[in-house]
Image (cartoon, helix red, strand yellow):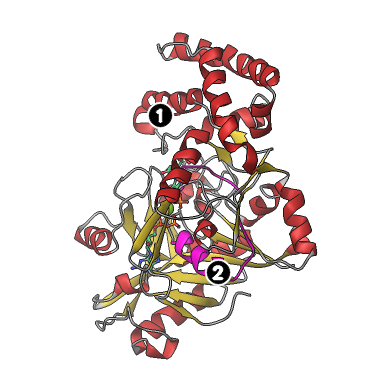
Amino acid sequence: MPALVLLGAQWGDEGKGKATDLLGGSVDYVVRYQGGNNAGHTVVVGDQKYALHLLPSGILSPDCVPVIGNGVVVDPKVLLSELSGLNERGVDTSKLLISGNAHLITPYHQTIDKVTERFLGNRKIGTTGRGIGPAYADKINRVGIRVQDLFDESILLQKVEAALQDKNQILVKIFNRRAITTEQVVEEYLDYAAQIKDFVTDTALVLNNALDDGKVVLMEGGQGTLLDVDHGTYPFVTSSNPTSGGACTGSGVGPTKITRVIGILKAYTTRVGSGPFPTELLDADGDKLRTVGREFGVTTGRDRRCGWFDAVIARYATRVNGLTDFFLTKLDILTGWERIPVCVAYEVDGRRVDELPYSQSDFHHAKPIYEYLPGWSEDITGAKSFDDLPKNAQSYVKALEEMSGAPISAIGVGPGRDETIEINSFL
Ligand code: GDP
Ligand code: IMO
Ligand code: MG
């Protein structure tokens, strides 16, 4: 004990990588529990910048064991290139553990992801095109290939053959694409098998033993609460559970072991891909947030949609995740505004609503009701304590805390590890 969960409280890209890396120096294990290389987690250490997609951000802390849990979907080609990229930069990746129960992304998943999106036209989800949804669909359909299948050639052959039976019909007859042969996939994946074999183990057993030995386990979410397939803005979501319940199913660590659930919360809001976004700014203010906040995707390079802070969403994240703390990021990006709008509730068809509307149509029609908080102009990137912040920045943080339903225990004032104000310890 204890296990901590760190997850996105909005639509992803809240700064989970930075927060995980910051805690990585004080924990024994960092576990990714869902998602795959749709994630893009940026970590800045000194003058070095790392973009992690599949690997847990704890990989940059030398004493921490990085773990890819059973709930993740693994593209082995991406995994190997990410590992070699880090090795070339002198990062030791030898401690990595990968669950044998994690599912594999294969080239047919990527092809189906991309062609499905193309055929959806303007109803598209705006996926990252990495094959995430189709790989999770196969898992639920019980035709997925797991990491452990790589180590038994005849099982691998049978499973790939079975999976390709209907995939090839779909690819050829519906999408007019070329069929993929079993041999092609098996040959490629056996080669990956040899390269990742030493990392693969029963990670749920390792983690539970570690907790029994008093070690600290940090579970790092990908994506965010509003992208959760159950609790997000369905269908404009990812195909997994970034919310705290997913940390249990995706790692094999039971809920009674979890002591803290930390929601990473940007001081404003961003979203990539399609779907409702009540506080979105389609004007010069949105462009300013994007430029100053450098809101461009780490994975796909797409412009992130930008808008004001939405307290309805933050409260919702507190509720569905059972958050104990928030880590507020990118407060420094808001420096320089005379006044800062904060969405405190919505107007839906002429009514005020204080909670996230559960009906999709209501959420699509939700208009933000703003309160205006006074801004500040002083540079806050060097702030080390809450008292170092200008009074109006302090008031902004306090107002967000009051509206969001959990204490703000840390504040990011820059991308670097040490550009953080720690208020309450997480450990
Ligand atoms: P993640 O997917 O949640 O890990 O977030 P991303 O890495 O996709 O996006 C967050 C971006 O904000 C990254 O470029 C981080 O380096 C940066 N970042 C994180 N925290 C802060 C902060 O407090 N201030 C500033 N200026 N940048 C931050
Ligand atoms: P991190 O971990 C922001 C979005 C995609 C799309 C939807 C479904 O960096 O916060 P998918 O490829 O998962 O099927 O796409 O989810 N999306 C993200 N948006 N940050 C992410 O990850 C995301 N991962 C997926 O843009 O709208
Ligand atoms: Mg990201």
Q: Which residue is mark 1?
A: 117
Earlier-in-chain disc, 1 versus 2? 2
Residue located at (59% from left, 50% from top): 96
Element class at badge 1: helix
Q: Quadrant of residue 118?
A: top left
Q: Residues within 10 Å of mark 2 (few under 14, many from 20)?
A: some
Closer to us: 25 or 375 = 25
Q: Tell me the distance, in whole angstroms, between the alpha carbons under discs 1 and 2.
A: 40 Å
Residue 231 vs residue 307: left or right? right
Residue 419 in sight in this render: yes
Residue 358 vs residue 252: left or right? left
Q: Is residue 26 magenta?
A: yes
| Residue 256 tag number | none
Residue 187, percent from left and from top:
54, 19
Magenta-colored span: 15-40
For the C terminus, the quadrant is bottom right
Element class at badge 2: loop
Residue 80, percent from left and from top:
49, 39
Residue 75 vs residue 142: left or right? left
Q: Answer yes or no: disc 2 within 8 Å of ligand 1.
A: no
Q: Are marks 1 and 2 in contact (CB under 8 Å)?
A: no
